[in-house]
Image (cartoon, rainbow, N blue to C red):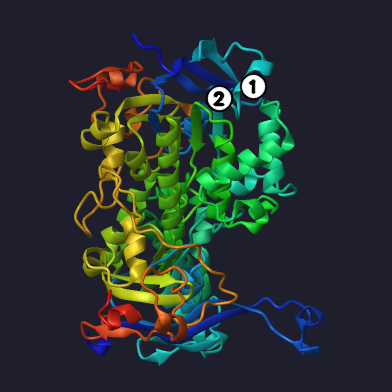
């Protein structure tokens, strides 16, 4: 893929959360000496990938694998511990607040729970106006009004309801409003964190269709965070599989579903229940997901992997790239051709 | 005719509100045989959990069962005394809830909670009760159950907790397990394990199961029969295979067509317009008519009956068949 096609690139991104507490909580006794030790949650470890213009990159993984943290770091809601984030060719993770503003306008986020992400005391109109007034103070009231009505129509919320409050809407309608809020400032890149998992089954399809329409009409690029693999199979261009803060595998959606390479991807895919398909044997993983506070040595997946050997326990696997760097997999077993 | 293990007829559940009475469950009926597994599918608010709760009369005020009968082992559970019910709950019919952290008491060890359940129904020693508990924990594949028995719920992961809840529900070898969204709070890989475990145990002990869920994928892997609920009524009921392969009711058709994966990648998904009506503002006639493409004539005025349709042993409630 050509360089100019890159929209967002992240390079060796790390995010840790310090959970050591106060000074006294940090003191531990080791070898009869008092030492000060900090405790971290290793949410995202050394993650690198590129989001290309116009694609839908889905990030999948089980709860606690760091996918939501990754989303928040990418849009700048959390600052990274180390690593770099580029928007087109410009590095943006080290910018200060005012320099960052113009990029915040280009990158918008849609959250999971439309009950929590809309201010209950603001009408739909106010909610939609706010980002535009903030980012473009010079714009006139009539233009704002016009834009609000236009975007409401685009997302399928009746513009007559602009003066209503969020509680007057159903879950699906609220999610439409929060998508509208993201679209108000003409973004290029949208990070959607589980946008449909709080919605009822018959409503999920409506919102997925809306997201795909918005991509076509507004020329958007998505990074979609989800745990629902059937959604991923349906709408994404490429898939990034995460486990315990680490990327296991990135590949175009067809390859992931037809020929998953990483043992974790294989297990994850075999666990999807599909209507009409009688119970098939799914790959059973050993044990449970380890805590991100004390990461396993070597490959983070080795404690549950069916193929793990001595090298997996010792050495962190390097991403093995193929397809012109569009896909990669991080697994010793794949590299040694034993999986 | 062979007698069914559980037979629910014309069940009606109402809630008393200040503004009047609300019918949450309307004319619901189904049967369950020994060892059979029934799935109740629907969106939130369709009444599937209320149906499950009403079987062992766990409907709390202001709700109450206002009509119909629930026949189980020769008794009508809507008419028996609280004492008889207490003997049936957890013993003959047990329940698994969605969130295992809410089901388990955080201040008692697993062992205490398990022994308590057994001792409430059986006149045996505490030691024997704990022995049964260990045996059941082993059945749900909890490693080293003897030591785990002395631990508290917070010391287990989500998947382990749900296994413990399953072990508790199996303690007294019930005839029926009612599982209300047992895997919704869990991840896909854990979900697959838990469903497999439930299936294995039900098959081994010939236990009947009512699985309440919104996930058609889960239901079709585990159950033999599906009841689809919409706005407090069953709109279609039949064998799982038939319903998934050849749905009759427009709502069921819509639900299956709307699943991602039913169409080619990147294509637009089929969508059911609108959303489920609020129980306080139920539309006249068929409750689904405002969202139905086929609605006409009597759909707007007359509630359709759940009657046999087609060649299969299947019931659907739709005028437009």
Rendered location of residue A194, percent (x, y): 44, 60
**Do we see residue B266 in this rendering?**
yes
Q: Label 1 belongs to which residue?
A: B87
Rendered location of residue A206, percent (x, y): 34, 49
**Residue at x-position 23% and y-position 19%:** B309
Rendered location of residue B254, percent (x, y): 28, 38
**Residue at x-position 46% and y-position 56%:** B187
Q: Residue furthest top?
A: B1
Task: Chain letter for mark 1, please.
Answer: B
Q: Is residue A313 above or below residue B248?
A: below
Mark 1: secondary structure: helix
**Residue at x-position 51% and y-position 72%:** A69
Query: Disc 2 to disc 1, how far (Cα)?
Result: 8 Å
Mark 2: secondary structure: loop
**Image quadrant for the N terminus of chain A?**
bottom left
Dot 2, how many residues are within 10 Å of its Cα: few (below 14), some (14-19), or many (20+)?
some
Q: Nearer the viewer, residue A26 or A81?
A: A26
| Left or right: where A135 falls relative to B314 | right
> In the rendered structure, are the residues bearing label 2 and label 1 in contact, judged by CB atoms less than 8 Å apart?
yes
Q: Nearer the viewer, residue B219 or B236?
A: B219
Rendered location of residue B302, percent (x, y): 34, 15
Q: Label 2 belongs to which residue?
A: B92
Q: Nearer the viewer, residue B23 or A262?
A: A262
| Sooner in the amino-acid sequence: mark 2 or mark 1 | 1
Q: How many marks?
A: 2
- Dividing the picture into quarters, in which one does residue A153 lie? bottom left
Q: Which mark is residue A41?
A: none
Task: Chain letter for mark 2, please.
Answer: B
């Amino acid at each position: 893929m050509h360089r100019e096609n890159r929209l967002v690139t992240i390079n060796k991104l790390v995010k840790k959360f310090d959970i050591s507490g106060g000074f006294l909580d940090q003191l531990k006794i080791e070898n009869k000496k008092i030492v000060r030790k900090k405790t971290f949650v290793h949410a995202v470890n050394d993650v690198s990938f590129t989001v290309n213009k116009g694609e839908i990159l889905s990030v999948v993984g089980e709860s606690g694998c760091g996918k939501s943290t990754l989303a928040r770091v990418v849009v700048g809601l959390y600052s990274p511990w180390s690593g770099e984030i580029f928007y087109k060719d410009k590095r943006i993770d080290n910018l200060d607040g005012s320099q960052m503003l113009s990029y915040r306008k280009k990158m918008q986020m849609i959250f999971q729970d439309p009950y929590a992400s809309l201010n209950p005391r603001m009408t739909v109109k106010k909610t939609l106006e706010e980002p535009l007034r903030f980012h473009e103070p010079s714009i006139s009231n009539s233009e704002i009004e016009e834009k609000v009505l236009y975007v409401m129509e685009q997302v399928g919320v009746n513009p007559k309801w602009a003066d209503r409050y969020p509680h007057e809407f159903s879950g699906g309608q609220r999610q439409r409003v929060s998508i509208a809020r993201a679209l108000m400032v003409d973004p290029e890149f949208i990070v959607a964190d589980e946008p449909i998992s709080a919605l009822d089954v018959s409503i999920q399809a409506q919102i997925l269709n809306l997201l795909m329409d918005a991509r076509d009409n507004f020329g958007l690029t998505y990074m979609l965070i989800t745990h629902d693999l059937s959604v991923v199979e349906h709408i994404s261009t490429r898939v990034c599989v995460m486990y315990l803060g680490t990327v296991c595998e990135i590949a175009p959606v067809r390859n992931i579903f037809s020929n998953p390479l990483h043992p974790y991807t294989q297990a994850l895919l075999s666990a999807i229940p599909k209507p009409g398909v009688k119970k098939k044997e799914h790959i059973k993983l050993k044990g449970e997901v380890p805590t991100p506070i004390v990461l396993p040595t070597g490959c983070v997946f080795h404690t549950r992997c069916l193929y793990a050997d001595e090298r997996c326990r010792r050495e962190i696997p390097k991403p093995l790239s193929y397809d012109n760097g569009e896909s990669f997999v991080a697994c010793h077993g794949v590299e040694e051709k034993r999986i | 005719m062979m007698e069914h293990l559980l037979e629910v007829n014309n069940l009606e559940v109402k809630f008393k509100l200040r503004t009047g009475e609300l019918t949450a469950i309307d004319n619901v009926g189904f049967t369950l045989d020994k060892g059979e597994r029934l799935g109740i599918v629907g969106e939130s608010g369709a009444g599937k959990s209320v149906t499950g709760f009403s079987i062992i009369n766990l409907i709390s005020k202001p709700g109450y069962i206002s009509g119909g009968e629930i026949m189980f082992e020769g008794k009508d559970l809507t008419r028996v005394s609280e004492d008889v019910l207490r003997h049936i709950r957890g013993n003959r019919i047990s329940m698994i809830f969605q969130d295992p952290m809410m089901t388990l008491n955080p201040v008692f060890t697993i062992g205490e909670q398990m022994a308590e359940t057994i001792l409430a129904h059986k006149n045996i020693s505490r030691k024997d009760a704990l022995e049964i508990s260990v045996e059941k924990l082993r059945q749900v594949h909890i490693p080293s159950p003897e030591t785990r028995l002395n631990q508290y719920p917070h010391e287990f992961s989500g998947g382990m907790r749900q296994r413990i809840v399953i072990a508790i529900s199996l303690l007294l070898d019930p005839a029926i397990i009612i599982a209300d969204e047992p895997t919704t709070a869990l991840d896909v890989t854990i979900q697959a394990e838990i469903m497999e475990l439930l299936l294995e145990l039900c098959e081994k002990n010939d236990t009947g199961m009512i699985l309440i869920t919104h996930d058609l994928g889960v239901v079709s892997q585990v159950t033999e029969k599906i009841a689809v609920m919409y706005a407090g009524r069953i709109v279609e009921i039949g064998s799982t295979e038939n319903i998934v392969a050849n749905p009759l009711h427009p709502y069921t058709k819509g639900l299956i067509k709307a699943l991602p994966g039913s169409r080619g990648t990147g294509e637009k998904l089929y969508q059911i317009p609108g959303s489920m009506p609020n129980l306080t503002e139920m539309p006249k006639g068929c409750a689904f008519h405002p969202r139905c493409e086929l609605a006409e004539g009597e759909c707007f005025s007359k509630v359709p009956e759940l009657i046999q349709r087609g060649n299969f042993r299947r019931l659907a409630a739709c005028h437009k068949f």
